[in-house]
Image: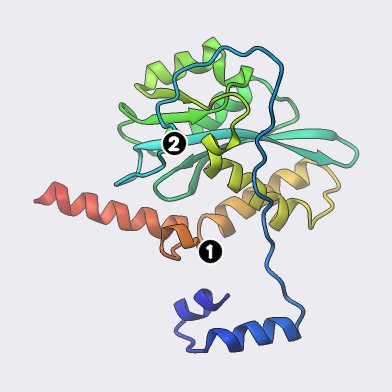
Amino acid sequence: MHKVLEKKNIKVNIKTVQKRMRNLKIRSIVAKKFKNHKTKEKIKQLPNIINQDFETTSINQKWCGDITYIYIRGTGWTYLASVMDMHTNKIIGYSYSKKMNKELVITALKNACINVKETKGIIFHSDLGTQYTSKEFNDLLKQKGIQHSYSKKGTPYDNAKIESFHSIIKKEEIYVNNYKSFEEAKIKIFEYIESFYNRKRIHSSINYLTPQEKEDEALKLLEKSNIA
């Protein structure tokens, strides 16, 4: 809250902000820490190229993706597949469906690639779910020249960035609303991602910029380097 006020050129002491928030009974939403769940299911381990190294120097170097479950009254379980650029924390592609199948993650990846001129060399990280290990999904990656990196089984920290986003969207949007239909949820999720998360929500991990501001910053640097 203090950083948001600073960005709006409102000078105020952080203790004053904290006191005002207490008086108004405003509290931050704290995401739960990841827990490493062991599984007895035998899963073939595939290459983990990222290996918890989330460092980047620009956009379109490392992406990550995952699926999260969303319960809708009268509809049942629905599924959101998201793709994030690790440099900006921006959600660059997503797909929302009543079915958790390979088409869900394929659509999310295709949407992420729409505005990217050159995808060759990008590393895409995911878990070992059947949707991400499917032949069709990996054929699309090969077609785009994208390398596939996989989390170790039962290790959510390997995909911490996208896990964090799904925790955030649930606490800030999904859990505080009671959607009456799949269609309503779809509209609200779109509005949250495109209007709020990508363009208004600041992140301490990227120097209190929004994902869109971080992307704009990266694009300017790339433009300068190309001119030079």
Coordinates of residue 142 in the picture (x, y in percent): 39, 16
Label 1: element kind: loop
- Residue that lies at the very extreme toward the right in this rendered image: 74
Q: CA distance from mark 2 to mark 1?
A: 21 Å
Coordinates of residue 78 in the picture (x, y in percent): 76, 34
Three-letter amino acid code of the residue under disc 1: Lys
Residue at point 57%, 13% (across, down): 134
Query: Picture quarter containing residue 82?
Result: top right
Q: Is residue 102 left or right of residue 126?
A: right
Residue at point 70%, 51% (across, down): 188
Residue at point 70%, 15% (across, down): 41
Label 2: element kind: strand
- Residue that lies at the very extreme toward the left in this rendered image: 228
Q: Which numbered tag is attached to residue 192? A: none
Coordinates of residue 19 in the picture (x, y in percent): 67, 86
By what rule are the colours in the image chosen? Answer: rainbow
According to the picture, the residue beneath numbered tag 2 turns out to be 63
Three-letter amino acid code of the residue under disc 2: Trp
Residue at point 67%, 20% (across, down): 101
* Residue in the foreground of this view, choosing between 115 and 119: 119
Q: Is residue 166 left or right of residue 56?
A: right
Mark 1 neighbour density, 10 Å: few (under 14) some (14–19) many (20 or more): some
According to the picture, the residue beneath numbered tag 1 turns out to be 200
* Residue in the foreground of this view, choosing between 184 and 124: 124
